[in-house]
Image (cartoon, rainbow, N blue to C red):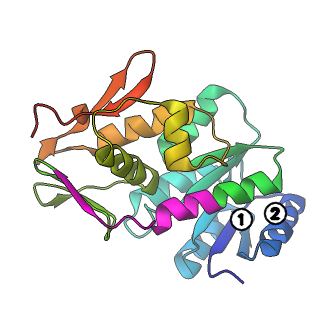
Amino acid sequence: MSTDTVLIVDDEFAIRDMLRMALEMADYRCIEAEDIQKAYQLIVDERPSIVLLDWMLPGGSGLELMRRLKREELTREMPVIMLTAKTAEDNVIQGLDVGADDYMTKPFAPRELIARIKALLRRSGGGTESEKIQVADLLLDGESKRIFIADQPLEMGPTEFNLLQFFMSHPERAYTRGQLLDQVWGANVYVEERTVDVHIRRLRKALQSSAGDYSNLIQTVRGTGYRFSPRGVV
């Protein structure tokens, strides 16, 4: 069985049971919680590799739990996929803004969920890139998966890190949202293009610190998408 542990947080037993069976067939170890209190306890005790988090839960919403995870140092980089019956764009964006790495709208196919889990664990667990890339005082260390501005470490989620690593490895080229999805999320993962915009906003925010502001290196290319341009900085 895989060493990766998946925490399923959903108040409906039938959904947890369906997900557990599908994930165990894909060789994941599963643990389950039906509310945010038990979920947080399992996160602290078990340190799962990834959390599948339902939006609506007894005793508090999934968003409330996610806010807590992103506030605390030991859990802020733990990957989270939101599972929600909410389809309105504002709800999806809200979930991503709070810190979700991905989301899926019920009902969904277990095979697609497993594909997204694999892609997200690949992004957060470290690929083969171990190089150091530097632009002025901005340093990306691929081996330690850390970002620094003038030796000051930045807080950044795994998706934002991989976006920045891709951008810094391919400067001055404009990429469409679809191309960024293929390169960073993976060609076989089905994620809506608006997800890219949310993570770009989070990346720009992460690149602003008291040691320097490098958010303007991520440029919007009207009618196309985004590019990373260090011109005028180096």
Q: Nearer the viewer, mark 1 or mark 2?
A: 2
Residue 78, position as x, y percentages in the image: 50, 64
Q: Would you call the spot at circle 1 few (<14 residues within 10 Å), some (14-19), or many (20 or more)?
A: many
Q: Secondary structure at mark 1?
A: strand
Q: Which portion, as a residue range, is magenta?
A: 118-134
- On residue 19, the disc is 2
Which image quadrant for residue 23?
bottom right
Residue 8's mark?
1
Quadrant, the C terminus: top left
At which x and y percent is residue 162?
A: 41, 53
Contact between marks 1 and 2 (CB within 8 A): the answer is yes
Amino acid residing under circle 2 = Leu
Q: Quadrant of residue 92?
A: top right
Residue 95 position in % (x across, y down)? 57, 41
Residue situated in front as seen by the camera: 207 or 76: 207
Counting residues from the start of the chain, the first of labels 1 and 2 encountered is: 1
